[in-house]
Amino acid sequence: MTYSKKELRQAYIARLQQLDLNTRLSEEKRLVSMLFNQPEWMSAKTIGLTLSQSFEIDTAPILLHARHEGRTVVVPRTLPKRQMEFVEINEETNFDESSFGILEPHDGRVYAPDEIDLMVVPGVAFTKDGQRLGFGGGYYDRYLSKYHGKTIALALPTQLADAGEWTPDEHDLAVDRVLTLPEC
């Protein structure tokens, strides 16, 4: 039986929401630690990151670690026509809640795609070869079509999908690498 991307998206979100909290926190901590040891992270001066929603991998520890290391953190702000831009955040940043219920910077310096060294790309599910099932709006695919830096995604074991579980659309862009926990 073949499922639509919408059905798969709902199923993966449900799986994330049903994860045991202790298991999830342990897996997230290990995954985030792995990220900090990746060459893409170590060489990046400016990092694109999302402000996570409750069912996503918590990006707050990543953001704090990056800032502690003196890296610039930029987060998305949505624009009309399903576009977005990345804005630097710091202690003075003011936030507004978007129509999606996500905090976005109200002001701050906008970074062009070629000024961002590493993009940590969110998603609902990923294949090991970098295919990603996003949230359905196409914002990241549109942005990544103009971005030529490194991309990496973090995937909890429950977010790993089999190749061919969905058929990528023509506009769907894969990430360079999917970082996940080693199989036990």
Image (tube, grey):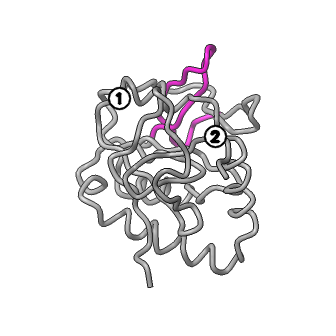
Q: Residue 152, image x and y in percent?
A: 38, 50
The boundaries of the magenta stretch are 74-94
Q: Which quarter of the image is occupied by the C terminus?
A: bottom left
Q: Is residue 100 magenta?
A: no
3D distance between C-alphas at marks 1 and 2: 19 Å
Q: At x 71% / y 75%, what residue is drawn?
A: 21
The earlier-in-sequence mark between 1 and 2 is 2
Q: At x 30% / y 43%, what residue is drawn?
A: 150
Q: Which residue is labeled 1 in the image?
A: 147
Q: Is residue 79 magenta?
A: yes
The dot on residue 21 is: none
Q: Amino acid at mark 1?
A: Tyr
Q: Amino acid at mark 2?
A: Phe
Element type at mark 1: loop
Q: Residue 180, image x and y in percent?
A: 44, 66
Q: Quadrant of residue 83?
A: top right
